Amino acid sequence: MDILRFTTCGSVDDGKSTLIGRLLYETKLIFEDQLEALQADSKKFGTQGERLDFALLVDGLQAEREQGITIDVAYRFFPGHEQYTRNMATGASTAQAAVLLVDARKGVLTQTKRHSRIVSMLGIRHVALAVNKMDLVDWSQPIFDEIELAYRRFAQDLGFETIMAIPLSALEGHNIVDPGHAAMPWYEGSTLLNWLETIPSGQYEIAQPFSMPVQWVNRPNLDFRGFAGRVSSGSVEPGDSVRISRSGVVSRVKEIVSYEGPQQSATSGQSITLVLENEVDASRGDVIATAAHPIECADQFEVGLLWMSEHALLPGRPYAALLHSKSASVTITQIKHRLDINSGARLAAKTLGLNEIARVNVSFDRAVPFVPYAENKRLGAFIVIDKLTNETVGAGLIRFALRRSVNVHWQALEVTKAARAEMKHQQARCFWFTGLSGSGKSTIANLLDKRLHADGKHTYILDGDNVRHGLNRDLGFTEADRVENIRRVAEVAKLLVDAGLIVIVAFISPFRAERQLARGLFDDGEFVEIFVDTPLEECERRDVKGLYAKARHGELKNFTGIDSDYEPPQSPEVHLRTVGIRPESCVDQIIHLLRS
């Protein structure tokens, strides 16, 4: 079956659910009325008959066609509210065409433009501008012409191959399947369904070289080992030579198995299990591809990014990422620019907010197999996930790999970290103090440094205020700057531990994600998180620097505990409750841990 996938989008109350309901109702009537004739001669109705089974955004909906697809099921994927833009983007990711609704009474709105830019970003090149509710403007040709002209001016740089403007009434069904109202003799163009029939259905994926991400390794017994996944492009047959993305090992396809049993071939979109002629090292996230066109791996990319969270994107913060079936950690290293939704202007930005679109550089914590999104949607797109909440916060489309990682290699050093620490008769560690301003971090850290120095240990303190006089003097106190502040300090601390030192870090470091980032840089047992737990009221009472007073009067912005959150550690190695306890006693607790 030649399936066309399309998405509908538009602003609130533009008539998306009514349009889909009308389209489903009309096409289902055609299907039921002509079922016997269609079975006898499928060519009688041409491509229209073949496309009655088109999928709406998700593959699962096509199975429900004969039982009837309810408006509610379809509507879930066509929200108009700004906070549901992520649903629209998710649905459009597999579509070949977009039906963009505009209320004839309102014209082109900001949400219309936002959806258009997302559609363009996702590689959709065919757009129907469905000017709905024409019956409420007396089928006015001047109003329709004005809306079409305004949209074409806006969309001239979005790269659409076709823009078909159609005046219609979803409620009354005019120009959906049947031609328009008698009051619209001035329109002689296509109906919506006829226009959909002209759109290429995505069969180009089959003509591409074969590739399939491995979703899992199927080994029910010792005599069978197969690699299960969904073919992302091309076709494959037994005997084809294939290559594993990560290892580069070449093998041949011995057998293709699907739910129905052995297959002689498989094409794009099919879920299969590949059995290879010899044992190869491949696991979830690897890509099996035709040997003549191997899949490239890289860890840094330029990416088109749609941010889908109310919590701002923070460059330098580690997020989780899922690229096809490959899981990794990803960091946005640079926001090159964000797009102005209305004008398309490229604007400077340090962070991104809800529904903003940007061009960014990203860094994965490992090399991942990929194909640029423009060439393969399945292998070139990934989602960004908040590690703490598991919320999907962004969608990335890979443009190209940055070759920095290819040319930059880690220099192996003969004198190891263990050798440097052994020479100093100590175990290299990072003691990471975190807590509110005024909690006593620096006081306790300084006493710990003195105690260790007296015991002949080699130490160094990285204090928050001191570092901001030099290394981080270019950073402010916005949330984004604080993330970068901690990232730099964590990297410096890692180098000092590599030198065999005991490093004492005293920073507010208010966010768990950044402390987790720091922990991840060190080997097991090297990172000791020390929570200096002092109530806010006590910190304000101490307030030796007068900072809380200034923050309360609005003179200091983004001050932790006042107008910026502090996320306390959930399971620190050392928990120091300082109220009523002398700093020396706190140091005793840490020394006890060190000696044990």
Image: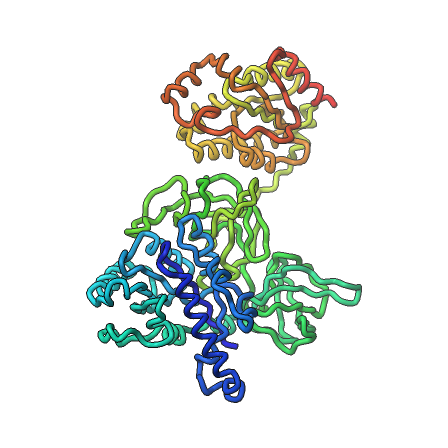
Q: Position of residue 570 (x, y in %)?
A: 62, 31
**What residue is drawn where x is 48% and y is 73%?**
203
Q: Quadrant of residue 422?
A: top right
From the viewer's side, name the closer residue of 530 and 356.
356
Q: Residue at position x 43%, y 23% from top?
A: 469
Most extreme residue toward the left, as rendered?
142
Tally of numbered tags: 0
As displayed, is residue 356 above or below residue 218?
above
Q: Is residue 261 above or below residue 345?
A: below
Can residue 358 be seen at all in this image of the molecule? no
Residue found 57% across the figure and 42% down from its top: 411
Give how far across and how far down residue 579 sits, in percent. 60, 14
Q: State left or right for residue 137 relative to residue 367.
A: left
Q: How is the image coloured?
A: rainbow
Q: Looking at the image, which residue sits at the far bottom?
A: 40
Q: Position of residue 352 (x, y in %)?
A: 41, 43
Q: Residue at x 59, y 37 (%)?
A: 521
Q: Is residue 365 left or right of residue 589?
A: left
Answer whether residue 148 is visible to the viewer in this image. Answer: yes
Q: Position of residue 434 (x, y in %)?
A: 56, 25
Which quadrant would residue 217 be assigned to in this image?
bottom right
Position of 440 with respect to 136 (left or right) is right
- Quadrant of the rendering where the C terminus is positioned: top right
State the residue in front, 580 or 362: 580
